[in-house]
Image (spheres, rainbow, N blue to C red):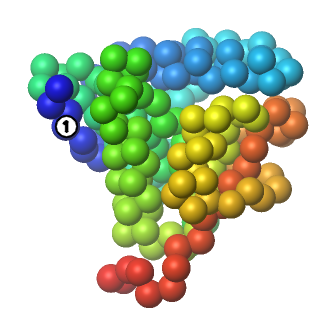
């Protein structure tokens, strides 16, 4: 499977991205509910992402897409700048047919590198408690556990069901 990765300044196919977001939210909301959280609407959250897509595009955000040769969207990950020197990693998702091919790791590594190029010294993230796959990835990449950070994009009402993470780039690891 040949996979192409690109940061985009606009969505090449907004409808396909909305469908990918629905799939992402369906998976994450099932995990949230299993952790004791409320039932929320994947459709409503996907629509909210589309309504605020400009926050995930340059100059302050970044959206990374993984696609097949035929253009099928296989996965994504976004960066949302929350301060001049900090960003939040959000909405990383890989469709089941692309899992096990290193797509998630590539999306993760490319977003970390891009955030550093954006001038970020610190990255933040969150995931649902018990989301072992994502927690393992964050741990492997050097993220540590922290309390909820003030700029977290999620509603405070779901904070008890989430884990919050932070990564501080080592000094001197940028060309800036």
Q: How many marks?
A: 1
The image quadrant that residue 11 belongs to is top left
Which quadrant holds the C terminus? bottom left
Q: Is residue 136 left or right of residue 92?
A: right
Horizontal side of 118 relative to 66 (left or right) equals: right
Q: Residue at x 44, y 59 (%)?
A: 112
Q: Nearer the viewer, residue 56 or 78?
A: 78
**Position of 98 compared to 45: left or right?**
left
In the rendered image, residue 22, in percent from the top left (x then y), is placed at 51, 16
| Residue at 40% across, 21% down | 95
Q: Is residue 127 above or below residue 87?
A: above
Residue neighbourhood size for the residue with mark 1, other residues' Cα within 10 Å, grouped as few (<14), some (14–19), many (≥20): some
Above or below: residue 70 compared with residue 63: above
Task: Estimate the x, y position of residue 67 in percent, counting from the top left.
Answer: 24, 29
Vertical side of 116 occupied by 55: above or below: above
The reply to whether residue 2 is visible in this rendering is yes
Q: Position of residue 166 (x, y in %)?
A: 66, 60
Q: Residue at x 24, y 41 (%)?
A: 5
Picture layout, residue 123 above or below residue 64: below
Furthest residue toward bottom: 172
Q: Nearer the viewer, residue 102 or 4?
A: 102
Q: Quadrant of the N terminus?
A: top left
Instruction: Please state if 117 lies on the left or on the right of 39 as rendered.
Output: left
Q: Is any atom of residue 11 visible in this view?
A: no
Under circle 1, the secondary element is strand
| Residue 116 coordinates in the image, percent (x, y) | 43, 68
Residue at which label 1 appears = 4
Q: Residue at x 59, y 15 (%)?
A: 26
């Amino acid at each position: 499977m040949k996979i192409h990765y690109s940061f985009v300044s606009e969505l090449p196919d907004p409808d396909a991205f909305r469908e990918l977001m629905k799939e992402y939210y369906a998976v994450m909301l099932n995990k949230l509910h299993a952790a004791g959280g409320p039932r929320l609407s994947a459709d409503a959250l996907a629509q909210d992402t589309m309504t605020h897509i400009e926050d995930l595009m340059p100059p302050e955000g970044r959206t990374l897409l993984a696609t097949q040769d035929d253009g099928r969207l296989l996965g994504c990950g976004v960066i949302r700048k929350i301060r001049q020197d900090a960003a939040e990693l959000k909405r990383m998702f890989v469709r089941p047919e692309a899992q096990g091919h290193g797509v998630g790791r590539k999306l993760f590594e490319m977003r970390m590198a891009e955030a550093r190029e954006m001038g970020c010294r610190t990255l933040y993230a969150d995931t649902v408690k018990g989301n072992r796959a994502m927690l393992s990835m964050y741990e492997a990449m050097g993220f540590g556990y922290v309390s909820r950070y003030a700029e977290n994009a999620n509603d405070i009402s779901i904070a008890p069901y989430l884990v919050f993470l932070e990564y501080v780039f080592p000094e001197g690891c940028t060309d800036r």
